[in-house]
Image (cartoon, helix red, strand yellow):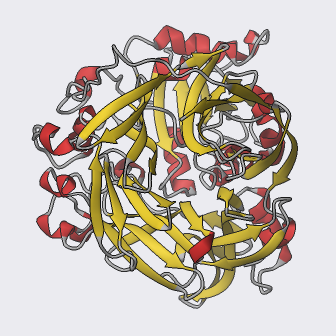
Amino acid sequence: MKTLIVKIIFVVFFLLPLFCSAQEEQLYFMHQKAGTEKALQHYVQSMFDKESGIVDTLSVIYINFIPPMGCPRCEGILAVYQQFLQKLTSKKAFVVNVLVYEKEKALASYIRQQDFQGNRLYVDTTDRFVSIFHVNSDVLMIPYLTKINLQHGRLITAVPALGIDLNESLVDKIVKKTTLDALYTVSDEKNTIDFQPVQQTRLIDAAYAKPKTSLLIAGSDTLPVINKLNINQDGNKLLIDNFITNSFVLYSKEGNCWTNPVLLRPSEEEKKLFISKSIPISIYDYLNEVKVLASMYLNASFTDTNLYVIASLPKLMIEIVDSVPSVAYYNMPIYFIKDTQGKNIYYNTFDDIELDGNYVFSHSEGSFFEEDTLFAFKLQKGWPAVGTEALPQEEKENPFLQEFYHEVFSLLFYNANTKSYTLTAPLDPLYETYKLGYYTSSPFVKSCHRDYYWVDTFIGKVYRLSNDLTESTLICDFFSMDTLMQQMPYSENLTYLDSYRKFFNKKIVDFEISDNDHCYAIVFDEKNHYLNQTKGTTIVIESLFPEEIDNRKLTTLQFGNDELQNRVVYGLYQNNRDAAIYLFDL
């Protein structure tokens, strides 16, 4: 699959990055909460430590709020945006780049790599941003370019960096805008709904699981918050995703510690694999300098004997558009097979996957099954799962139309040997009944005893796939969502889709199938993690996992083997100082 990211037109050596749609039509937005004027003034003052005199000289300040690597290629527009900004204000604009992230030590190499421009860089490790601003994604997921009136402590404008048409005209509008954005209150949300969870879990009688041992992760204070586990089947290797630097860290088990880290990141050779030799070196260097070219390791895990890395690399080539030479920029999905020391064995692309029906496959979440040289990818289509617009733009993207649900699938299996692929795992009928599209679809695949199983983690139904991967047979249903769901007040907008969050408050974190189709699942209900299993047609809660151990909070769990090949559950617990993996008997 080739995804056009950006096209750069040359006019007398001037480069203008173009993104896809107008600001006012964006899916993402940010507002200032009512009653936070003083809090915003104090927040800005805190960015200057003891140099508060600087703030006293400013009536307006431009702040770029950035969740590190929340949207890597969005960050590439910041340098160009600031160039326009300084040009249009005769270099009088005062710009602060605020990195909103709880672990400051994890940002050191990222800050050096990004080399942010602006007058000041500030790291916010607190929750002050979310106490002052409302973003419709609940947490800050993408960068916002903002302008703030310091005298009144008010937001003048906030522009999302994802999906905007960044040009001098847009920046000029930001510079000239002086009217204050309206303040946000809860009543401003259209069709405000109650998010009280519908699914309640009875945990009174459940016993807490006790860990039998723990393994510290060396140097974890410099890693970002770790969100998932990857431990090999022998229980002696660990992969950690350092998404802030687009890399992974490979650890080996020694005693009661994960140590001897090996850094896995795109090499200089890999970064240039798809850069056409017709691209002038000066152009390549410029695009690299402004961070438009992002080479990313997106996902990595272990095979039976090696490990795989799924990556996104830049593809640049010269194209002629209306007789004008231009640089076409594509995203090239690729995978690497590496040995357990991180050395390349071979690589290949997914360039021959050409989907129709408005489908896209999420290669950043792909899984690889070495025994069959088979990849499994999450499938999505339609608004709002794909794109950045506030509303569906075409009928084929519209999940509120009945025809949207004709032959809808949630998984793509890709055979790396035959270069063929299969679309399978029908979208659960509940999504069609309530017109939810792919908004909450979250499929997950595992291989158990040479069969493939899948589950939509929010629906809770576990299926076994046929040998040709085309048919799904229901094995167990952990949540019984068919009996819980009901029609919410209907409207064709994002608020309607969000109203169903009250039903989807449980999620399967991991599952396992025994020889006789006996099912186990680790479930998270937004408060507790616990182990479920099937006994006949009954779902039984076997144990609760402690949400905190040794002042470390539980992040995630997974099934696995220890070094003696005993079945265990691995639990990742962490705080801002360190992280450890605890082993629980199954």
Asked which quadrant contains residue 255, the reply is: top right
Image coords of residue 48 (percent x, y): 74, 17
Q: Is residue 505 visible?
A: no
Front one among 580 and 400: 580
Q: Is 203 on the left-hand or right-hand side of 310?
A: left
Judged from this view, the residue extending furthest toward the right is 260
Q: Nearer the viewer, residue 380 or 203?
A: 203
Who is closer to the viewer here, 204 or 128?
204
The answer to whether residue 100 shows anywhere in this view is: yes
Q: How many marks?
A: 0
Q: Is residue 266 left or right of residue 408?
A: right
**Residue plotted at (45% across, 67% down):** 451
Residue at image point 51% right, 16% down: 153
Q: Position of residue 581 (x, y in %)?
A: 68, 31
Q: Relative to the observer, which residue lies in front, 35 or 475?
A: 475
Left or right: residue 213 compared with residue 134? right
Q: Which residue is painted at 75% across and 21% down in the image? A: 577
Q: Residue at x 34, y 19 (%)?
A: 203
Q: Quadrant of residue 578?
A: top right
* 327 relative to 509, above or below: below
Q: Position of residue 571 (x, y in %)?
A: 60, 32
Q: Give the x, y percent position of residue 444.
A: 44, 55
